[in-house]
Amino acid sequence: MHSTTEAAVRSLRAKIVHEVETLAKMERTFEQDYFKNKCRFAIQDVEAADTMFLRPMETETWRTPADELRTFSCAEAVFELGVSARRQLQEILNLL
């Protein structure tokens, strides 16, 4: 991985850890199975950013900085799917 990408990857991984912890806590808080499942799906989205995009970047040496930027952008987009779900779930939790 190129040095220009490493810091961004570390930062996104820290965000992933934080989101997973937050979503897991929300899952434990909800009583309804429906919302518990939604939390699990959001966790899967957040973790997919790492497993689908960030991990392969560590082992693949053929990528140019531009390739890595595109891949990192995809990782961020998938991560945001989980973040968006967490925000909606948080609104619902606040109403219950």
Image (spheres, rainbow, N blue to C red):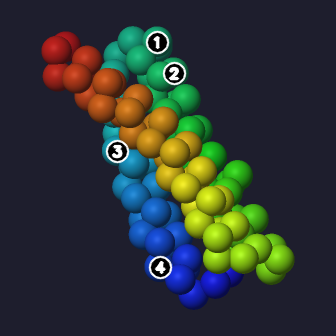
What is the distance, in whole Å, between disc 1 and disc 4 at their CAs? 37 Å
Q: Which mark is residue 22?
A: 3
Residue 59 seen in this snapshot:
no
Q: Which residue is mark 4?
A: 7
Which comes sooner in the sequence, label 1 or label 4?
4
What is the distance, in whole Å, between disc 4 and disc 2 at their CAs? 33 Å
Q: Residue furthest front?
A: 66
Q: Position of residue 79 (x, y in %)?
A: 50, 46
- In the image, what residue type sits under mark 3? Thr
Quarter of the figure with residue 27: top left
What is the distance, in whole Å, between disc 2 and disc 3 at their CAs? 15 Å
Which comes sooner in the sequence, label 4 or label 2?
4
- In the image, what residue type sits under mark 1? Tyr
Query: In the structure shown, which secondary structural element does the residue marked by tag 1 occupy?
Result: helix
Which comes sooner in the sequence, label 4 or label 3?
4
Q: Which mark is residue 37?
A: 2
